[in-house]
Image (spheres, rainbow, N blue to C red):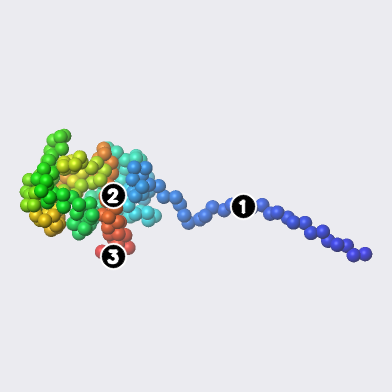
Amino acid sequence: MLCRATLRAVRLPVVSKPFLGVRAVSTLPSNPHIYVFEHPLDATRSLLTLLPTEPPNVQLALGATTSVPPTPDSFTENRQFHPILQSVLATHAINDPSVKQQAAAFASPGGFNLGQPNKRGGDGAGAANQQAGMGGANKGGWIHVSDQRNPPDWGRIAWPEDIFGSVEVDGDGSLIGNWQDSGTYRILTREGILGLTPYLREKLVRRLKELESGNN
């Protein structure tokens, strides 16, 4: 007598396995372009960088902080970062659309009224203490390139700690170049941390990646 075997479908338990090799990378709530890593040399601090590479390169980081979000009291700037930032600005600031727009406004007939100091006091920094002081109104002069974290009111210049540097403009509103470091810029203030335009941030990240890969 033939027996027909009864086949029974057996459902095996599904075990979820974590996807290995990928770890979520944290960024600052106030600036999603800045990554937060554990400091590879100091477990009490976090490293802030524009590169998502892990482990992070300490020499290419913005700096380190004992608290997140960082504050002026908790943050220590990486002194090696500032020269990199300035070299990128010296090369690319004159091609930034926002800087070009500022230069055109400065050289316009009403440009003489631009660049007045803020009410808090202080005249900013860089090649021209006041942007209109050496030109404007079709005469040319200097304009400041500043951080986006605390943009000044129209017709005013940024605070000294927000000014990256200055570039020269001719009477037609064309950027000549001649970049000059302000010497007063701070990566982190009470108003926030490094805030570049999309154009300049892209150029800076590209340069950092070149240095990271050893292409000096």
Q: Quadrant of residue 7?
A: bottom right
Up the image or down, 157 lies above or below 200; here it is above
Query: Which residue position holds label 2?
Result: 62
Q: Is residue 147 in sight in this rendering?
A: yes
Amino acid at the residue labelled 1: Val
Give the secondary structure at mark 2: loop
Q: Earlier in the sequence, mark 3 or mark 1?
A: 1
Distance (Cα) linking label 3 and label 1: 45 Å
Residue at numbered disc 1: 15
x, y percentage for residue 176?
Answer: 13, 58
Residue lying at the far front of the rendered structure:
109
State the residue in front, 99 or 196: 99
Q: Residue at x 36, y 47 (%)?
A: 32
Give x and y (percent) for residue 63. Answer: 29, 47
Can residue 185 be seen?
A: no
Image: 75 above or below 87 = above
**Which residue in the structure is indicated by mark 3?**
215
Q: Is residue 140 left or right of residue 81?
A: left
Q: Amino acid at mark 3?
A: Asn
Mark 1 in CB contact with mark 2 (< 8 angstroms): no
Q: Are discs 3 and 1 less than 8 Å apart at CB?
A: no
First in sequence, mark 1 or 2: give its number: 1
Q: Amino acid at mark 2?
A: Leu
| Alpha-carbon span between mark 2 and mark 3 | 20 Å
Q: Secondary structure at mark 3?
A: loop
Where disc 1 sits, the SS reads loop
**What crowding class fits label 1: few (fewer than 14 Cα within 10 Å), some (14-19), or many (20 or more)?**
few
Q: Residue at x 6, y 52 (%)?
A: 139
| Total marks placed | 3
